[in-house]
Image (cartoon, rainbow, N blue to C red):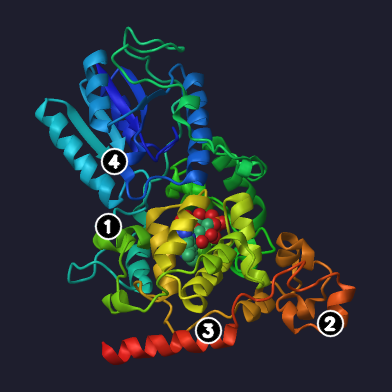
Amino acid sequence: STAILWFRRDLRLSDNPALIAALDSYDRLLPVYIHAPGEDAPWSPGAASNWWLHHSLRALDVSLRERGSRLLLLSGDSLACLQALIATSTASAVFWNRCYEPVSIARDSRIKQQLRAQGIRCESHNSGLLFEPWQIKTTTDQPFRVFSAFWRRATARLADIPTPTPAPGILPPLPDGISSTDGRLSQSLPEQPLDALGLLPRIGWDAAFSDSWQPGAAGAQARLRRFFDQGAHDYAVVRDQPSVAGTSKLSAHLHFGEISPRDLLQAANATAGDHEAFVRELGWREFSTHLLFHFPQTAELPLNPMFDDFPWRDPIPPVLLQAWQRGQTGIPLIDAGMRELWHSGWMHNRVRMIVASFLTKNLRIPWQTGARWFWDTLVDADLANNTQGWQWTAGSGADAAPYFRIFNPVRQGERFDPEGGYVRHWCPELARLPNRYLHAPWTAPVGILQQSGVTLGLSYPHPLVDLADTRREALAFWQQLRDTD
Ligand code: FAD
């Protein structure tokens, strides 16, 4: 009998609970990916995510073919595609791993209900989290809003996390009548070649992505090994320095489920040294999903309702937003971060906080606008992590940085990029400025600017806003909000 394995954001064969469950009872397996970006609206995947997805699907298909199977790509309404597949293949079961975005939960519940009513066995599993979002609760059975308390409760249960399972060496055949090589499965099915999905950008903006990333499970495992062989031992020390490759860069692999958090936990436990700081970041990932699950409105709205009435700039002046998006604000650390994002589809965590603080506090542009830009340009764009990161920085989220703590990008640069390696790399027009002026070129004497080949307003912008004035203004607005609350 045949089971459908519906791949979604679990694009791997190792430690894949839905796959294992299907293999347990079925001797024919139909692996499928359904392209239905509209079902994620209003958070349909952005351009950078689509680039990643294209390559990840190709890698998954290669792994399946190595094991005697292949990936069927369908395009259209998920339920309709599954029903067409069931009709064509006489499959009697569908297995998948869960997604936790509010719209995915609604869609999957509907599909489960419909298929079960047709007598189809439907099973969903957890492949993407250490804990289900509903597993970690306060003593009064409430969701957590404070990370430290959440993580304390979760760490007490880390020892119960099952060890990851290896990928099966060989997979059951496809059902009769379905080509194991290529060719259309059936005229009635909307099967698509990968290239026809149109996931790759039409402009050459992704040119450098392939230098930075290897989407797919093999790329994820290689990065994991590299991190634990080289970087993990001083993660706690260097993770805040953007000029050092001191973090794992596994976020996109985790988002697409090419590697499981259990793999990361196991690697941390098996590697000599103290990896508590790294595992704690996995905790933030769990906490983000916990928050989005329990407070689904937060992808659009502030968790703290006090911020409902925050006087964001309205309308948003395009010149401010575009300068931020393009890395042309005249504030070197901000520009370096935004250029890193555009060029590589990723940005260092500390710099994400600093550019987000600048946008929301110094420019007073709503965090949702920044979250949208990140959504389109990050290869690791993830609704829970992105929402939590933006709300935390803007001050409106759970356990958020207090609003009055406004990052000063100059001080942050001096502290975390003291030798200027990060800024010099992404803003080469400033490379010859001495360290002392690198993070605030507008303070440099004219002679130094001239010697360094910098002409403010020409080779590099004047600062977009005055950091001290805009800080004062933001605090005044916040104070007003508190007074009226
Ligand atoms: P590492 O330091 O190696 O951490 C290991 C893993 O832990 C990461 O891969 C990630 O899955 C998780 N993690 C680390 N930090 C956080 C965090 N603060 N919150 C939640 N999970 C975390 N992360 C995303 O995956 N997708 C996003 O869309 C996203 N948007 C963000 C937006 C803002 C404004 C901010 C401040 C942070 C955002 N983050 C997001 C969190 C964080 O910046 C990235 O997860 C991290 O930089 C990824 O790099 P890494 O894999 O080298 O992390």
State which tag comes first along the sequence, 4 or 1. 4
Please rate how many residues cluster around mark 4, counting C-alpha atoms within 10 Å: few if below 14, some from 14 to 19, many from 20.
some
State which tag comes first along the sequence, 3 or 2. 2
Q: Is residue 13 above or below residue 462?
A: above
Residue 171 is situated, as x and y percent measured from the top left of the image, at 41, 20
Is 117 left, or right, of 226 in this rendering?
left
Q: Residue at x 44, y 32 (%)?
A: 13
Q: Residue at x 62, y 70 (%)?
A: 329
The residue singled out by tag 2 in the image is 446
The residue singled out by tag 4 in the image is 125
Amino acid beneath label 3: Thr
Quarter-of-image position of residue 419 = bottom right
Please rate how many residues cluster around mark 2, counting C-alpha atoms within 10 Å: few if below 14, some from 14 to 19, many from 20.
some
Quarter-of-image position of residue 136 = bottom left
State which tag comes first along the sequence, 2 or 4. 4
Give whichever of 452, 176 is nearer the camera. 452
> In the rendered image, is residue 403 in sight?
yes
The residue singled out by tag 1 in the image is 293
Amino acid beneath label 2: Val
